[in-house]
Amino acid sequence: MSLVNLANVCAHLKNCTMVKHGVAKIPLSRLHLNLSFHLYKQGFISAIQKGSDISPDDPNSPVDITPDNISSRKLWLSLKYRDNQPVLSHISLVSKPNLKIKLSPTEIKALASGLYVRKIKPLQPAETILVKADDNEILDLQQVAAKNLGGMPLCRFR
């Protein structure tokens, strides 16, 4: 897991929403797929498709990922807009590549309940923080608090 790559993806998605692109493509990795899944599940994007550098794959004929084409595989994300404004209005990193923050289960619960924790602002309405939990799953803050796990907060979006 690279926080540098995650920072690049967050900046790319932010730039794409600011110029009102309909589709954004990001490199395919397990971390980016989990981020995309959570964005989709929360309703910030309308679709996720695997594809190449050129276009998304046809759903009727999927392409296998091989060592020859792994570097050219991308995730194509369909961005949502409401009243000509992006639904994904803000996305940013919480843990930076040079400042990784590890939170204990009690700190996770405090952050989920609306308290400041180590200069991390509490959640606002309709905002989500993704956390890499101690069991290496990427979950949102509420799920990590419910499972009583610690972890590293990755990014927040609203």
Image: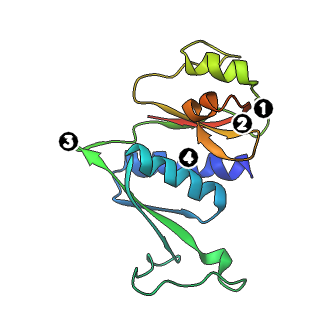
Q: What is the quadrant of residue 32 in the picture?
A: bottom right
Residue 62 to residue 27: above or below? below
Residue 141 to residue 3: above or below? above
Q: What kind of residue is marked 4?
A: Cys
Can you identify the residue that label 4 sits on?
10
Please state the horizontal and vertical placement of residue 113, each as a whole percent of the image: 55, 16
Please state the horizontal and vertical placement of residue 72, each as a whole percent of the image: 61, 77
What residue appears at the point 39 percent right and 37 percent down from the top-left corner?
A: 89
Question: Which element type, helix, strand or loop, lies under badge 1?
Answer: loop
Mark 4 to mark 2 CA distance (whole Å):
12 Å
What residue appears at the point 65 percent right and 33 percent down from the top-left corner?
A: 147
Q: Are marks 4 and 1 in contact (CB under 8 Å)?
A: no
Of callouts 3 and 2, the N-terminal one: 3
Label 2 Cα neighbours within 10 Å, binned few <14 / some 14-19 / many ≥20: some
- 12 or 70: nearer the eye? 70
Q: Which mark is residue 99?
A: 1
Q: Are marks 2 and 1 in contact (CB under 8 Å)?
A: yes
Label 4 Cα neighbours within 10 Å, binned few <14 / some 14-19 / many ≥20: many
Can you identify the residue that label 2 sits on?
96
Q: What kind of residue is marked 1?
A: Leu
Q: What kind of residue is marked 2?
A: Lys
Mark 2 to mark 1 CA distance (whole Å):
5 Å
Please state the horizontal and vertical placement of residue 127, each as a whole percent of the image: 45, 30
Of callouts 4 and 3, the N-terminal one: 4
Can you identify the residue that label 3 sits on?
83
Question: Which element type, helix, strand or loop, lies under badge 4?
Answer: helix
What residue appears at the point 20 percent right and 41 percent down from the top-left corner?
A: 83
Label 3 Cα neighbours within 10 Å, binned few <14 / some 14-19 / many ≥20: few
Mark 3 to mark 2 CA distance (whole Å):
33 Å
